[in-house]
Image: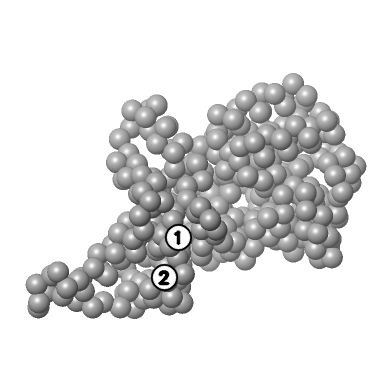
Amino acid sequence: MVLLGSNREKIMQIGIVGLGRMGANMARRLMRREHEVAVYDLKQESVAALAKEGAIGATDFADLAKKLAKPRAVWLMVPAGAPTEETIEHLRPFLESGDTIIDGGNSFYKDDVRRSDSLKKQGVHYLDAGTSGGVWGIERGYCLMIGGDEGAVRRLEPIFESLAPGQGDIPPSPGRENIKGTAEKGFLYCGPSGAGHFVKMIHNGIEYGVMQAYAEGFDILRGAASQTLTEGYRYDFNAADIAELWRRGSVVGSWLLDLTAMALAEDPQLAKFTGVVQDSGEGRWTIQAAIEEAVSAEVLTAALFARFRSRQEHTFAEKMLSAMRNKFGGHVEIYPGN
């Protein structure tokens, strides 16, 4: 299906469940674009805070459903796995045929297919919307990778377009000038149930590899000052300056490098990071998919295994990974005793 963005100015109503780092900011971004947003979270103080900003607060799932006009749309921003499963099971009794659940978390794509089949028996649509943007999305917009029922996606296009970055002043890639679609706007219908989260899964697997490459490269730069090297071949590099340099005209420039430069400017030794690097599941699933497809994925596999190792021994490279995760997603290091 080709989405054309024709409903850009349409104002819609949507419910959001889960008001953490991303959920609350997504609600704010939608409200800024004049959509009506009803919100619910187990922490009622989070609901009250957004209600003060113009959202419609709900006290429970039944109340949320009552406050949404039919056909309802409810966007979930809760952790993947059991929390998402439980949220859907608590919500579904209050939904009716024609309503839609959008899972914006990082669910496993095979779980999406199962949930979609189950909800379809009730007449409820289930969309999987891989969402990238982290804590910066409220200003930059969110890159959305969407799977599920085509009709439900089309109906909710104004929501997706409001959350997405938009084309801005970035022209389409050469050769795409006459291709009509929404990829240039930052959201894309990827296919049937599970397709959105499959694309997001690979996105995050790639992210692991790119981050690991930066971390290892900067660790080698730092090691150039080692006293074990022959005198005359030692270099005391300023990593923060090099990161800033590479942001300008280099082929390795990226948003992740921008965040790396920011982290190094704030703390050149990354002293506040231990180097304990978590993985949120998508990296593992990417490798599982590669195995099922018999596709070689050496870099992504090595990047995942490096995170496992980081929980046992800590290098400057691993501190840099922690620093980048903190910068782009507000992730806090988790380790025994903290």
| Residue type beneath disc 2 | Leu
- State the residue lying farthest toward the front: 337
Residue 45 lies, with reference to residue 128, above or below; the image says below
Which quadrant would the C terminus be assigned to in this image? bottom right
Picture residue at 36% right of the left edge, 58% below the top = 314
On the image, the x and y values in percent for residue 319 come to: 40, 63
Which type of secondary structure does the marked residue at label 2 adopt? Answer: loop
Picture residue at 9% right of the left edge, 72% below the top = 230
Determine which quarter of the picture holds residue 146. Answer: top right
Is the Cβ of the residue at disc 2 closer than 8 Å to that at disc 1?
yes
Q: Is 318 positioned to the left or the right of 281 in the image?
A: left
Residue 140 lies, with reference to residue 84, above or below; the image says below
Picture residue at 23% right of the left edge, 78% below the top = 236
On the image, the x and y values in percent for residue 298 come to: 29, 41
Q: Distance between the residues labelled 2 and 1?
A: 9 Å
On the image, the x and y values in percent for residue 32 come to: 74, 64
Which quadrant would the N terminus be assigned to in this image? top right
Look at mark 2 in the image and give the residue it sits on.
270
Q: Residue 322 carries which label?
A: 1
